[in-house]
Image (spheres, rainbow, N blue to C red):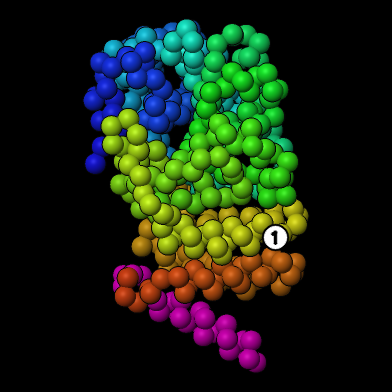
Amino acid sequence: MKNLFDFIVEFKNTSFDSLGITEADNAVFCRLAYLNFSGFENKTLKYISDYFPYTDESCLNKANKNIIKTEDLLKLLGKTERFENVVLTDFRECSEDNSTTAFSASVFRVSKAVSYVAYRGTDEKILSFYEDAELAYAFPITAQLASLSYINYLMKKYETDFIAGGHSKGGNLAMFSFIFTSDENKKRIQTVYNNDGPGFPKDLAPLLFTPENCKKIINISPEDAIVGRMLETCGKNIIVKSSAAAVSQHNLFTWILNGSKFERAENYSMLSNYVEDTLTNSLESLPADDLKKTVNKIYEIAKKSGLNTLDDINKNNYSNIILSVIQTSGQETNAGNETKEILKVLTKNLINSVDIEKRLPEIDLKRIKEFIENRKKKEDA
């Protein structure tokens, strides 16, 4: 199964003139957007790969594993004819008051005719998924407005065409900047790649998704997509295969390549459809205030379960996750009716969605069953 590293090696001597910006190139630039290129503006990838302050691998942990892989990607790119002369320009990074990155983007000038605008997304931390969920009840957010200002600035500075894209939240920012820029600017944006990023609130879809806007948007997401199926999107949808499972498929490094394109899958998985049918659709029916409360509760469930990154979501933690859902739904005596119903649906479907006894024999079922029995006794008393 080939990945981004294999693509770079396979096409290392193929110029962009003979093979334009492909799906794989799009993913490469979106991964590079996660790096801090401060001080490297107007430098080639070959130069940057030689002098970039790489992370000490002894510091490797779950939080920065993909950053180190991205640095390895950069090292490899600088050694290829295809990428060595790509120039990085206009690196931007804006932070909120709490020092978290609200917006970051980079431009990769591929030729005199076209550049790729890459918006940084969210990482593999559970907190990042919480930030993605914010898009459902807060519109527009700071990062979206910054992305629009950024594309408008680029349009004034350069006369070339652009391809815009991003991964996760970055995909949403790419779509937002394209949809809300002027019609004249849109003519110079060839394609917009949304790589497993969330969409927009359902009530805004009729206003945002005009035929002209949808024509240039390409949504790429894996079979087990969760983030990429949050909220509403438009345009062409491509479902791709991944070497990982469940939420770990959100990682671009796991997407399987066939040449310069991703390996296609026919349909979304049962897991992805389950989340779409039970959680996403239910959340869309909530008023903004109740939606915010519910998102906070789901984040609380993750923290109670001991989840800090996507790697923590595995069969050994299912018992903690299910128990946390049950506990949280049982504590919601002061929540609004809509929030209570969402948590009830989440509890019921999470438990019923898998045959736990057969598929996950390692988890601690006794603790879950005892909790359910004790809760029933209290309700009957």
**Residue 320, how many percent across, how many down?**
45, 66
Residue ID at (32%, 70%): 359
Residue placed most toward the observer, 8 or 34: 8
Q: Residues within 10 Å of mark 1 (few under 14, many from 20)?
A: few
**Residue 285, how many percent across, how many down?**
70, 60
| Placement of the C terminus among the 4 image quadrants | bottom right
| Placement of the N terminus among the 4 image quadrants | top left
Q: Is residue 296 left or right of residue 309?
A: right
Which kind of residue does numbered mark 1 sit on? Ser
Numbered label tally: 1
> What element does badge 1 sit on?
loop
Q: Is residue 150 left or right of residue 110?
A: right
Q: Against 91, is 361 above or below?
A: below
Q: Residue furthest front?
A: 211
- The span shown in magenta is 360-381
**Residue 234, how many percent across, how many down?**
59, 42
- Residue ID for mark 1: 285
Residue ID at (69%, 33%): 142
**Residue 112, how many percent across, how many down?**
47, 7
Residue placed most toward the observer, 225 or 94: 225
Query: Does residue 48 show up?
Result: no
Query: Does residue 217 show up?
Result: yes
For the stretch drawn in magenta, what is the main secondary structure? Answer: helix
User: Residue 332 occupies which quadrant of the picture?
Assistant: bottom right
Residue 366 lies within the magenta run: yes
Residue ID at (49%, 43%): 237
Residue ID at (64%, 86%): 379
Q: Is residue 211 left or right of residue 249?
A: right
User: Residue 30 occupies which quadrant of the picture?
Assistant: top left
Q: Against 342, is 135 above or below?
A: above
Residue 155 lies within the magenta run: no
Q: Residue furthest bottom?
A: 381
